[in-house]
Amino acid sequence: MTRSTHAQILNLPNIITMVRIAAIPLLCLLLLSPQRTPCFWAAALFAAASVTDWLDGYLARRMGIVTVFGKFLDPIADKLLVMGALIMILPFGRVPAWMVLVILGREMVITGLRGIASTEGIVIPASNLGKYKTIFQLVAIIGLLLHYDYHWFFSLDHPLLIVNMHHVGMFYLWIATVITIWSGVDYLSKFIRVIAK
């Protein structure tokens, strides 16, 4: 491996991305149990991994080391993280299977279209819908992983509010699903317009 290739792959942002991918098996292991404690730690791990998604991109831009490898690996890490969490909670009945199918199907279709576009030397700019979709998906999944009732305490003796995190997660997942469909149709229409030219 040349020094240039080494720098392309083993730089701080890419290492953070690889750590995010390495966290996915641990996330899946925690989600083998539907009990409150492992699900809490799974949610904490998922939230931490989600933060690294922002961090690696920020560092790559700040340090001026945006690489082809990083551009390839980062979206894969994001998709694997979301897919892993959603698939692991399916057997618990926490999420409708059709929503998971819509979310994962959209990712596969758009990834395929991007591959086709890149082979033709075509760049189709992403819209902000994709960013909103990701944000709502991440918040929804954290809620679904937590699942149980949680107390927001005013003091230890007097809970101020009891929140069912499953309901919170489903609320955001409905929004995420709508944006997922909307952003997928938006990208597909852009793809068709560009290819038709």
Image (spheres, helix red, strand yellow):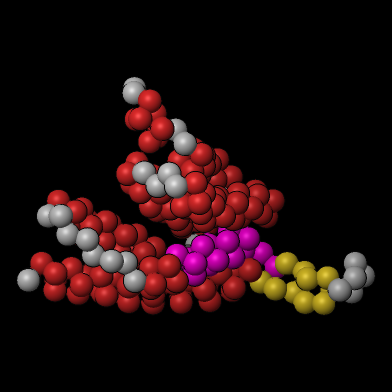
User: Dominant secondary structure of the magenta stretch?
Assistant: helix
Residue, x 38% and y 25% (percent of image)? 3
Which quadrant would residue 123 be assigned to in this image?
bottom left
Residue, x 18% and y 68% (percent of image)? 191
Instruction: Locate the N terminus by quadrant.
Output: top left
Viewed as shown, does residue 95 lie left or right of 5? right
Which quadrant would residue 192 be assigned to in this image?
bottom left
Please say whether residue 163 is visible from this viewpoint: yes
Please say whether residue 144 is visible from this viewpoint: no
Tell me how many marks there are: 0
Q: Which residues, given as a range, are shown in magenta?
A: 134-149
109 in the magenta segment = no
Residue, x 40% and y 47% (percent of image)? 66
**Residue 177, position as x, y percentages in the image:** 40, 72
**Residue 167, position as x, y percentages in the image:** 59, 74
Residue, x 23% and y 65% (percent of image)? 124
Residue ranking furthest to the left? 197
Front-lying residue, 64 or 118: 64
Instruction: Locate the C terminus by quadrant.
Output: bottom left
140 in the magenta segment = yes
Front-lying residue, 140 or 32: 140
**Residue 143, position as x, y percentages in the image:** 59, 65
**Residue 36, position as x, y percentages in the image:** 68, 55
Front-lying residue, 96 or 165: 165
Residue ranking furthest to the right? 157
Viewed as shown, does residue 134 lie left or right of 160? left
